[in-house]
Image (cartoon, helix red, strand yellow):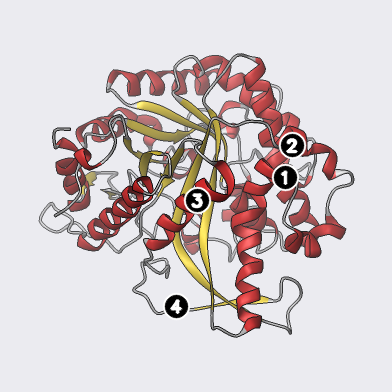
């Protein structure tokens, strides 16, 4: 028996998530260039050098997309506002068309019974700020708070919740240490600075918005189950180090006023001066926490490499098109662990969960049984976490639409709705219809 809406607490929110750069089309409406445009234009960074200039053309087709949200029976929509669209130079001049666009978009959600869950930063850093060092420059916190204030001034009266940053680990580690996302740095000093400044920006914006009387403020963190590649003590330690980098750095920074010692052992010498003085600002109360969860990874000790002396090894479970193991148990693990070790009864939302497949339209339909199973298994894990005391209040699928999957270009399809990137035609997949049936079930 598949789960239905009736299996979740009264008022539980079901939705789907998207991000501005991945769907809107950054060429439209006077948006400024972002570091994703230039990263994508540099050979070797993105599959086929694809970028988000047109994407799903949500900028023009947003009403169709909100209709799809409503017709699925969702009652919340997680979207992001683009910094580079709102402030093309990152600072100073404001693009009025951008404010008008988000204003209409939010009204469109409300008209369809969708609660707007806004994310302020889902990775489209304005290029003019990248020129100044982007996340490695401490001033990014003030620039970000200014942007947060400007967009909130326009739509903050109608959004249900605001997240400052999407996935600080990706913003900092993936993009400044591993070099796999914009701006593509592979430098421990840049990474250490970004790891701290991303939370400083969160805290600075949060304080600013709170001062303006805004509530329901949070942040979205991503978590990846870190398993040891073997039971050898060195591999167990490698997994613990990666767990500290990925899964503990940000939540402990937010809730404990310091960072894990295992990570400071590597990053300490490269941290910005006096970082400790920022921890009170960073540790301000949040009203909710977003949890993005996709997979687990297996870590082995790699003594021949520099700190953190680890490499990943493939795991045994079935994998998605991203090569990510399907491991719903990990979601249960993080939701209960967060409640137990970090946030107590703070409202949690699963803000992203989903999978990529090679979906194709055949005779007007898209059959995606693996995604259906994936989503219902993760919903079941969420329900079990609730039964075991985690205060989870909503679940957002990633993603509403097939979209620009960053370094993977348009090749990896995560949508509940298929998008033909030639014609822009939207075709709801079988997983969309399965969810709609589950949500139509009376409470
Ligand atoms: C997350 C991102 C999201 C999407 C999914 C697959 O890390 O937040 O934009 O790319 O992964």
x and y percentages locating residue 59 in the rendered image: 40, 32
Q: Nearer the viewer, residue 54 or 223?
A: 223
- Mark 1 C-beta to ligand 1 under 8 Å: no
Q: Which residue bears the numbered disc 1? A: 135
Q: Nearer the viewer, residue 372 or 341?
A: 341
Which element type, helix, strand or loop, lies under badge 2? helix
Q: Which residue bears the numbered disc 3? A: 51
Which element type, helix, strand or loop, lies under badge 1? helix
> Marks 3 and 1: CB-CB under 8 Å?
no
Nearer-N-terminus badge (3/1): 3
* Residue 42 higher or lower than 240, as above or below: above
Residue sitting at x 12%, y 51%: 364
Which element type, helix, strand or loop, lies under badge 4? loop
- Mark 2 C-beta to ligand 1 under 8 Å: no
Closer to the observer: label 4 or label 2? Answer: 4
Which element type, helix, strand or loop, lies under badge 3? loop
Q: Which residue bears the numbered disc 4? A: 315
Q: Nearer the viewer, residue 242 or 172?
A: 242
The answer to whether residue 181 shows anywhere in this view is no
- Mark 4 C-beta to ligand 1 under 8 Å: no
Nearer-N-terminus badge (2/1): 1
Name the image quarter holding the N terminus. bottom left
For residue 140, the mark is 2
Nearer-N-terminus badge (4/2): 2
Nearer-N-terminus badge (4/1): 1
Label 3 neighbour load within 10 Å: few <14, some 14-19, many 20+:
many
Separation of marks 4 and 2 at Cα, in angstroms: 38 Å
Residue sitting at x 37%, y 18%: 107
Q: Nearer the viewer, residue 174 or 422?
A: 174
Separation of marks 2 and 1 at Cα, in angstroms: 6 Å
Residue sitting at x 50%, y 70%: 297
Separation of marks 4 and 1 at Cα, in angstroms: 33 Å
């Amino acid at each position: 028996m598949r789960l239905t809406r009736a299996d979740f607490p009264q008022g539980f929110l079901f939705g789907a998530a998207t991000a501005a750069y991945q769907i809107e089309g950054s060429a439209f409406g006077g948006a400024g260039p972002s570091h994703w445009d230039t990263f994508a234009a540099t050979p070797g960074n993105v599959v086929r050098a694809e970028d988000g200039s047109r994407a799903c053309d949500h900028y023009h087709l947003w009403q169709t997309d909100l209709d799809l949200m409503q017709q699925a029976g969702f009652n919340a929509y997680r979207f992001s506002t683009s910094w580079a669209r709102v402030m093309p130079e990152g600072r100073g001049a404001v693009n009025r068309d951008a404010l008008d666009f988000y204003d209409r978009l939010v009204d469109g959600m409300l008209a369809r019974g969708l609660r707007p869950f806004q994310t302020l930063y889902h990775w489209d850093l304005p290029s003019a700020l990248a020129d100044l060092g982007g996340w490695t420059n401490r001033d990014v916190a003030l620039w970000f708070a200014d942007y947060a204030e400007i967009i909130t001034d326009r739509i903050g009266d109608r959004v249900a919740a605001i997240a400052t940053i999407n996935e600080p680990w990706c913003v900092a580690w993936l993009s400044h240490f591993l070099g796999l996302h914009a701006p593509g740095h592979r430098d421990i000093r840049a990474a250490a600075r970004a790891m701290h400044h991303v939370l400083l920006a969160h805290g600075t914006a949060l304080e600013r918005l709170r001062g303006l009387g805004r509530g329901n403020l949070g942040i979205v963190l991503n978590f990846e189950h870190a398993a040891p590649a073997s039971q050898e003590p060195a591999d167990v330690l490698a997994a613990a180090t990666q767990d500290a980098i990925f899964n503990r750095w940000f939540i402990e920074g937010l809730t404990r006023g310091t960072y894990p010692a295992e990570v400071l052992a590597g990053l300490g010498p490269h941290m910005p001066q006096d970082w400790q003085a920022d921890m009170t600002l960073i540790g301000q109360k949040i009203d909710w926490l977003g949890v993005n969860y996709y997979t687990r990874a297996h870590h082995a000790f790699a003594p021949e490499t520099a700190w953190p002396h680890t490499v990943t090894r493939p795991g045994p479970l079935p994998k998605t098109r991203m090569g990510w193991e399907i491991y719903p148990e990990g979601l249960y693990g993080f939701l209960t662990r967060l409640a137990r070790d970090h946030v107590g009864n703070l409202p949690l939302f699963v803000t992203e969960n989903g999978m990529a497949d090679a979906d194709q339209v055949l005779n007007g339909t898209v059959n995606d049984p693996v995604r259906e199973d994936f989503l219902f298994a993760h919903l079941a894990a969420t329900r079990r976490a609730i039964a075991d005391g985690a205060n989870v209040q909503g679940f957002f699928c990633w993603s509403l639409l097939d979209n620009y999957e960053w370094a993977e270009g348009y090749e990896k399809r995560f949508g509940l709705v298929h998008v033909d990137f030639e014609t822009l035609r939207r075709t709801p997949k079988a997983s969309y219809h399965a969810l709609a049936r589950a949500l139509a079930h009376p409470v």
